[in-house]
Amino acid sequence: MHAIILAGGKGVRLRPYTTRLPKPLVPIGDEFSILDIILTQLSQRGFEQVTLAIGYLGHLIRSYVGDGSRWGLEIDYANEEHPLGTMGPVLQILDRLPEDFLVMNGDVLTDLDYAELLDGHRAAGTPLTVATYARQVKIDFGVLTTRERRVVKFAEKPTIDYRVSMGVYGLSKRALTGYEPGTPLGFDELVLDLLAREEPPGEYAFDGYWLDIGRPDDYDRANAEFDEIKPLLLKGA
């Protein structure tokens, strides 16, 4: 099984922590970086090969990770000379990948079973499978629906339920057919193109632990919770 970890971003929202470190290398707890946790999880779930898509401060990631033998993995690298979006880095290495593979952001803390997601993607036969997570937003106002200057519906302080992408995907090569390597390709663009082609992505609904470390508040929360969530994230480590 092959996984691609997207680790090339500048981590602007997480500054000042990312001024001197790429986001995947910021420490969580006293022992681990985010990337260390992800690589350990992939190894525990049977993945053998990992490609790290690097850009900003990528030499630090190379120096830290090396060939991956510390985790029992074979690790290679794809360099982003300029920002390519979520799926753009994958286009550059498509000929090195198996038919089905995992793509994930390098700033995700979750106990999702990556192998189960990839197995489900293969079984479903969809070009793309998106891991999703439930979110709720409480609206602190009365919400009006209007039509032709009349109120046709009212809800007092409703709660809106929706699902978000976790930044973890099962992907098949055929989903990327026709795109030019070296050009930017975002997750949003790929999803819209697949919908237009009537090849809708599949969903892998997940309700375990998930935290996208995109902002200082998220990072502080991850460190505050780490002693509690470590057994979930690193079973047996």
Image (cartoon, grey):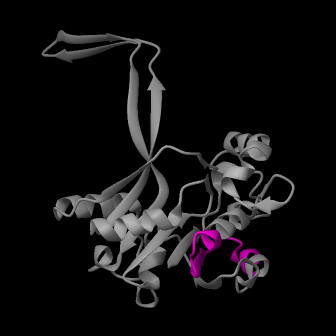
Q: Is residue 156 left or right of residue 44?
A: left
Of all residues, the one furthest to the front in this rendering is: 236
Q: Residue at x 44, y 19 (%)?
A: 139
Name the quarter where the C terminus is drawn.
Answer: bottom right
Residue 127 vertical position relative to residue 68 in the rendered view, above or below? above
Q: Residue at x 66, y 70 (%)?
A: 39
Q: Is residue 221 left or right of residue 214?
A: right
Given residues 13 and 61, the one toward you in this image is 61
**Residue 214 locus on image (x, y percent):** 62, 49
Residue 222 vertical position relative to residue 188 in the rendered view, above or below? above
Q: Is residue 59 left or right of residue 12?
A: right
Q: Is residue 23 magenta?
A: no
Q: Residue at x 73, y 84 (%)?
A: 69
Of all residues, the one furthest to the left in this rendering is: 148
Given residues 25 and 184, the one toward you in this image is 25
Given residues 103 and 85, the one toward you in this image is 103
Q: Quadrant of residue 51?
A: bottom right
Q: Is residue 47 magenta?
A: yes
Q: Which residues are magenta?
A: 42-62
Of all residues, the one furthest to the right in this rendering is: 30
The answer, for residue 123, to whether it is visible in the render is yes
**Residue 160 locus on image (x, y percent):** 39, 26
Q: Residue at x 39, y 17 (%)?
A: 158
